[in-house]
Image: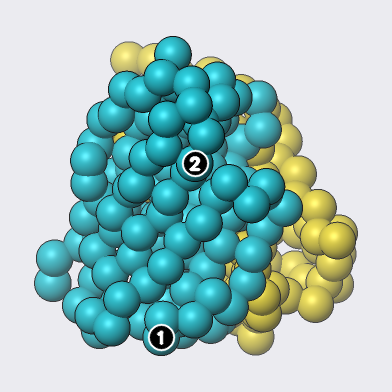
Chain colours: A yellow, B cyan
Amino acid sequence: KQEVTQIPAALSVPEGENLVLNCSFTDSAIYNLQWFRQDPGKGLTSLLLIQSSQREQTSGRLNASLDKSSGRSTLYIAASQPGDSATYLCAVGGYNDMRFGAGTRLTVKP
Amino acid sequence: KAGVTQTPRYLIKTRGQQVTLSCSPISGHRSVSWYQQTPGQGLQFLFEYFSETQRNKGNFPGRFSGRQFSNSRSEMNVSTLELGDSALYLCASSEGRPAEQFFGPGTRLTVL
């Protein structure tokens, strides 16, 4: 059974800092990995999708990498802003389902 | 394209009642998945429907059920509500499997 872990559970940084969020998974037989952002009480917003054949994806200030062999993905956020404050979840896509980590709650202080 | 929509956005029910939640996927998406999110358990998969057929089911009791219509809209039903069913219920649509999932805003269910 796929287990997804996100470390740290919470992170607080000053505005402008570059930061890395981590996601690890136990079964490397995945189809894709997706990073989401969730604001309090809201739904999930898709940030980046990495297919299993890819190593990384970039969108604006966000860069996500995938290393299937080691069961790890990272989400890099450059020049963080207070508007980036949210919970970030990674989800590992198998053929039959998608498994979510518990998320990292990010606070960017002005 | 319009995003995934869920109705209602908020619901308050009492124990023992039943509830039906609705999800309209992005146009052209044939897969709809449902998730329950609680502070203690995080996001848990309920079930997935594709072309009106339940394709996968999570580890939830039979009180949780769903269906999908020919226009891909989906409903989930919870019967005999319990206090522990209070949660944010999210649906996600995708073109198929495996594919990028797009989530709706959720339905916040409170059971008193």
Q: Which picture quadrant has residue A20? A: top right
Q: Is residue A75 above or below residue B3?
A: above
Q: Which picture quadrant has residue B91? A: bottom left
Q: Position of residue A28 (x, y in %)?
A: 82, 71
Residue designated by label 1: B51
Q: Position of residue B42 (x, y in %)?
A: 61, 36
Q: Position of residue B39 (x, y in %)?
A: 58, 25
Quadrant housing the C terminus of chain A: top left
**Local secondary structure at mark 1:** loop
Identity of the residue drawn at 86% across and 61% down: A1
Q: Position of residue A83 (x, y in %)?
A: 29, 30
Q: Is residue B74 above or below residue B89?
A: below
CA gap, disc 1 and disc 2: 24 Å
Say which of B97 and B13 sits in front. B13
Say which of A50 and B8 sits in front. B8
Identity of the residue drawn at 85% across and 67% down: A27
Callout 1 environment at 10 Å: few (<14), some (14 to 19), or many (20+)? some
Residue designated by label 2: B79
Is residue A70 among the parts visible in the rendering?
yes
Is residue B86 among the parts visible in the rendering?
no
Residue B95 in the figure: left or right of residue A65? left
- Give the residue type that dot 2 points to: Ser
Say which of B13 and A67 sits in front. B13
Q: Is residue B18 above or below residue B28?
A: above
Residue B76 in the figure: left or right of residue A30? left
| Mark nearer the N terminus (1 vs 2) | 1
